[in-house]
Amino acid sequence: MPDQIRRIDYFYVTVSDKPGEGARVLAALQAAGVNLLGISAFPHGARRSQLDLIPEDSGAFAKAAKTAGLKLSKKKRGFLIQGEDRPGAVADVASRLAEANINITSAQVFCAGSGRYGGMLWVKAPDLRKAAKTLGASAS
């Protein structure tokens, strides 16, 4: 089965960098029934953390975030990649973008077990449409 690549929306929130803040955000989304395709969290300035949140349904996510009092960033776009794990799986995707002269801004990819891998990657906004075409990405 070939890799599946689709466009995704993502948003970020910034929270205090202290125990429980990420859990608080995730629990609020869970209580609202929001399914997340991915999460990335990292330090963001002095005593702050940034949580990148990739929802399955952006509309339901935005509504739940508003109800929970979360201040979301503007919607951003990226790609979800999934496929059968094999040597060079990510190299194949990266090479296709490189050949199209598109720089990858950020990527997080992991073995998902059971012979599968999955990850997210981002390119600069002006390159998004060209990258989607290059990768044969489906709409989210």
Image (cartoon, grey):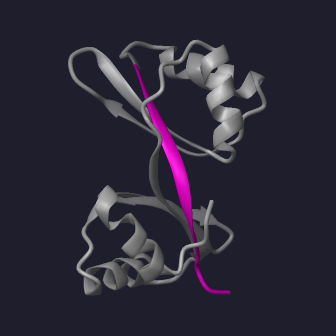
* Quarter location, residue 45: top left
Q: Residues in magenta? A: 1-14
| Relative to 60, residue 14 above or below | above
| Closer to us: 115 or 26 | 26
Judge left or right: residue 121 versus residue 106: right
* Quarter location, residue 46: top left
- Prevailing SS of the magenta stretch: strand
Q: Residue at x 78, y 31 (%)?
A: 33
Q: Residue at x 71, y 40 (%)?
A: 35
Q: Residue at x 35, y 24 (%)?
A: 49
Q: Position of residue 83 (x, y in %)?
A: 60, 75
- Figure quadrant of the N terminus: bottom right
Q: Position of residue 19 (x, y in %)?
A: 45, 14
Judge left or right: residue 105 versus residue 15: left
Q: Residue at x 62, y 86 (%)?
A: 2
- Figure quadrant of the C terminus: bottom right
- Reply yes or no: does residue 2 show up in magenta: yes
| Closer to us: 92 or 133 | 133
| Relative to 93, residue 60 above or below | above
| Relative to 44, residue 67 above or below | above
Q: Position of residue 126 (x, y in %)?
A: 30, 61
- Reply yes or no: does residue 22 show up in magenta: no
Number of marks in the rendered image: 0
Q: Position of residue 130 (x, y in %)?
A: 38, 75
Judge left or right: residue 20 versus residue 73: right
